[in-house]
Image: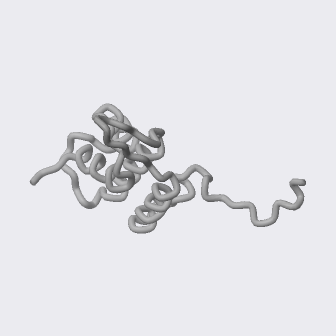
Amino acid sequence: MNRSNSDVCRAKCKLICNTCYVDDDVVNDVIIEEGLDPDAEYDSANVAAVVKCAILVVRGWVETSRSEGGVSTATDAEKVKQNIIFWCNKYGLDASELLSGSLSQIENGSQLW
């Protein structure tokens, strides 16, 4: 089964955040901006780049809940962040860069008050 970079990216988006279903334009734009061809056959040598694209898409995903036909789903932002960290570690990506500083913690903020 031949899959394109965009197919794999969409699958990784759902793997990171099971409620993240995005349209082709969004996925293709992110993939192109990262220097890949969205229609090219996926090559496992590019897995880190495709995972990075998926993380960028998920980071832009702002929906926290959805209700359709009586079925509701919700997104746990902390769990999504943990998933992003997991996939970054697996593929050698810098989680702090991809999470845009949201990992920083104040160890001693006493000078702030």
The residue located at (41%, 43%) in the rendering is 57
Q: Using the image, determine if residue 11 lies above or below residue 44.
A: above
Q: Residue furthest top?
A: 25
Residue 30: percent from the left, percent from the top? 38, 39
Picture quadrant of residue 33: top left
Q: Is residue 74 left or right of residue 106?
A: left
Colouring method of the image: one colour
The residue located at (44%, 49%) in the rendering is 75
| Screen quadrant of the N terminus | bottom left
Residue 92: percent from the left, percent from the top? 43, 65
The residue lying toward the viewer, choosing from 74 and 84, is 74
Q: Using the image, determine if residue 3 lies above or below residue 62.
A: below
Picture quadrant of residue 88: bottom left
The residue lying toward the viewer, choosing from 108 and 40, is 108
Q: Is residue 92 left or right of residue 42?
A: right
| Screen quadrant of the C terminus | bottom right
The residue located at (56%, 58%) in the rendering is 96
Residue 11: percent from the left, percent from the top? 27, 51
Residue 45: percent from the left, percent from the top? 27, 60
The residue lying toward the viewer, choosing from 110 and 45, is 110
Q: Is residue 41 left or right of residue 15?
A: left
- Tell me how many marks there are: 0
Q: Residue furthest front?
A: 70
